[in-house]
Each structure stands twice: as C-alpha cells, then as structure tokens.
DNA sequence: TGACAACTACGAAGATCTTCGTATATTGTT
DNA sequence: AACAATATACGAAGATCTTCGTAGTTGTCA
C-alpha cells in the first residue's frame, strides 16, 4: 500500500478547497493569490486524475471539491514524516514541534487534555 | 532563505550516518541493507555537493559524516510540514500524531513534562 | 454578428530525484 | 605479473513536478 503523498503545489490547492468548499479553478486561484492561472488549472486536473479531488463538469467552469478529508490526509502526512524523519518516534516529533513553535496557553492545555485521554485508554 | 529539504533517499543516508558516526559508503550501504551500491554512493556524493555531509578523502574509501545536526534538520522538517500541511498549527499536528501513534506511557509522561516546562515559561 | 473575455485541453520545457551501467583506479592475493 | 575485488567518477535514462505557451470552445455584450 503506497501512501498518498501530495506535492507542495497540491497541498496548496487542497487547503484552498477545504477552506472554500466546492469551488471553481478561478475561485481557488484567487484564494491562493499567486502564480499563473494555468498552473492552478493544471494542478487541479492532476489532482482529479489522482482521485484526490472530484470534478463536476456540469457548468462551463468546472466545480472541484476535495475527495479526501483534511484530517485523514494530515494523518498520512504525519505518518510519513514520522517514518522518514523520526524513525517512528512520535514523542520526538512532538518535542521538535514544541521547541519550534510557541503554543498558546490554551493550546497547551488542550494538548494536555488530549494526552490525559490517551493515557486513560491504556492505564 | 530556502529551507533545506532532504529527499527521501537523502534522509535514509543521513539517518545511517547519525547512527554510525563517520562512515564509508560501504558501511552506510550495509546499514541500509537494500538497493544498489552505486545508488548509495551517488546519493552520498549529492549530499556532499549540497553540503549536508562532509567527506574525508584521505583513504581510498572516503569517509563521510553528517555536516548538520539531527535535531536541527528534524526541526526544519517539522517547520516545513507545519507550514505546508497544517497551516502553522502545531497543536493540530500533535493531535494527528497522537491519534495515529500509540505512545508508551513513559513517552506520554515525558511529553507532559515538556508541556509543563513550556507552560512555565509563559505563566 | 463581431469582438473580446473566460474557460478547458494539451503538451512541452526545465528541474530535480532515483537508479544503475560503464569506465577507471587501487589494493590484495596467488 | 596477472587477476579478482573494491573504490570512485561520470553520465544518462526514466519518473515526477512545476510552469506556462498555445489552441480551441463557449459565453457576453455592444
């Protein structure tokens, strides 16, 4: 089973689609706010070929929507980086994340709650 | 400033070098335990060109060693995935990591300590 | 109807990554 | 000295990614 691994350009499109919901190439391109229109179009066509988005060709301006959930794909991305970069150690990954990014107090507490709930499951 | 972003093949070499310390192509290739010798050689030469490893050509079999720290490069990798995949939200990244990987109780507690210490800095 | 704007389709160029064949040099062995 | 084993060096083939030029189609509006 080969893991889905969107490219940088593809992630950008997908983020826009998750934010906007079903949208035309034009809308996505405006949301991104940079680059050549044809590049956006091409990337979205490729995403459709790969099955990561679905396309409604009803109207002249086709309407695309993400065919995969944001959380699911993010999970795959984490697995990927975990394997390739951290030798599988999620603890290490989180340590690097904590070092690099200052989390808001709220986020830290939410994280602590998440840890509590995970610990509960294995007591 | 363009962030350093080793490829999958390069990460594999680097992991081996961090584990072994300074090592020959042969040693790295054996450590990896797969693929063509020439591929390993080529990748290590490319890493040298990029400055991610340094090469001692004294002996016939050149000795390579990582020119960058593991933690530093992992930190960059996290920043990268944070930007591209998580829109900068470290909390979200950690949530996905927790969902996907079952951490050992020990790791969870270590993580909690890390959070405590980070929270301490901003009380 | 004629001209222009907006859209899709297609493909090729340039970059980068991975793989590996081939050439050449050095070392060790018999 | 001859040969086998082991190195490095070099480059090209095949894949994939990004970018963008060009062509053709459809819609709009004066």
Image (cartoon, coloured by chain):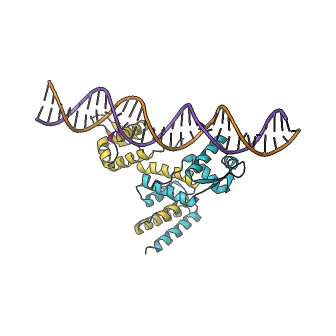
Chain colours: A cyan, B yellow, C purple, D orange
- Res B24 seen here: no
Instruction: Return the residue nearer the eye: A69 or B56.
Output: A69
Q: Is residue C20 above or below residue A22?
A: above
Q: Main secondary structure of the magenta part?
A: loop
Q: Is residue A113 above or below residue A95?
A: below
Give the residue at x 50% y 65%.
B99
The quarter of the picture where residue C24 lies is: top left
Give the residue at x 49% y 68%.
A115
Instruction: Return the residue nearer the eye: A120 or A101.
Output: A120
Instruction: Return the residue nearer the eye: D4 or A83.
Output: D4
The quarter of the picture where residue B28 lies is: top left
Instruction: Classify residue B118 as left or right of residue B19.
Output: right
Q: Quadrant of the N terminus of chain A?
A: bottom left
The image position of residue A103, as x and y in percent, is: 56, 59
Give the residue at x 60% y 45%.
A43
Q: Is residue D1 above or below residue A10?
A: above
The magenta segment: B33-38
The image position of residue B67, as x and y in percent, is: 39, 42
Number of callouts: 0
Instruction: Classify residue B3 as left or right of residue B29.
Output: right
Instruction: Classify residue B36 as left or right of residue B110.
Output: left
The quarter of the picture where residue B58 lies is: top left
- Res A94 seen here: yes
Instruction: Return the residue nearer the eye: A43 or B86.
Output: A43
Q: Is residue A71 above or below residue B41?
A: below
The image position of residue A70, as x and y in percent, is: 58, 58
Instruction: Classify residue A6 as left or right of residue C25.
Output: right
The image position of residue A34, as x and y in percent, is: 65, 43
Q: Quadrant of the C terminus of chain A?
A: bottom left
In reply to whether residue A27 is colored magenta, the answer given is: no
């Amino acid at each position: 089973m080969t893991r889905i691994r969107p490219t940088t350009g593809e992630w950008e499109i997908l983020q826009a689609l998750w934010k906007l919901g079903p949208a035309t190439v034009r809308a996505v391109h405006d949301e991104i706010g940079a680059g050549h229109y044809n590049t956006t179009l091409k990337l979205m066509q490729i995403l459709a070929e790969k099955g990561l988005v679905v396309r409604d060709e009803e109207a002249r301006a086709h309407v695309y929507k993400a065919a995969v959930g944001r959380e699911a794909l993010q999970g795959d991305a984490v697995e990927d980086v975990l394997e390739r970069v951290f030798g599988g150690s999620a603890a290490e990954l989180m340590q690097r994340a904590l070092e690099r990014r200052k989390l808001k107090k709220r986020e830290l507490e939410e994280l602590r709650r998440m840890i509590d709930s995970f610990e509960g499951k294995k007591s």
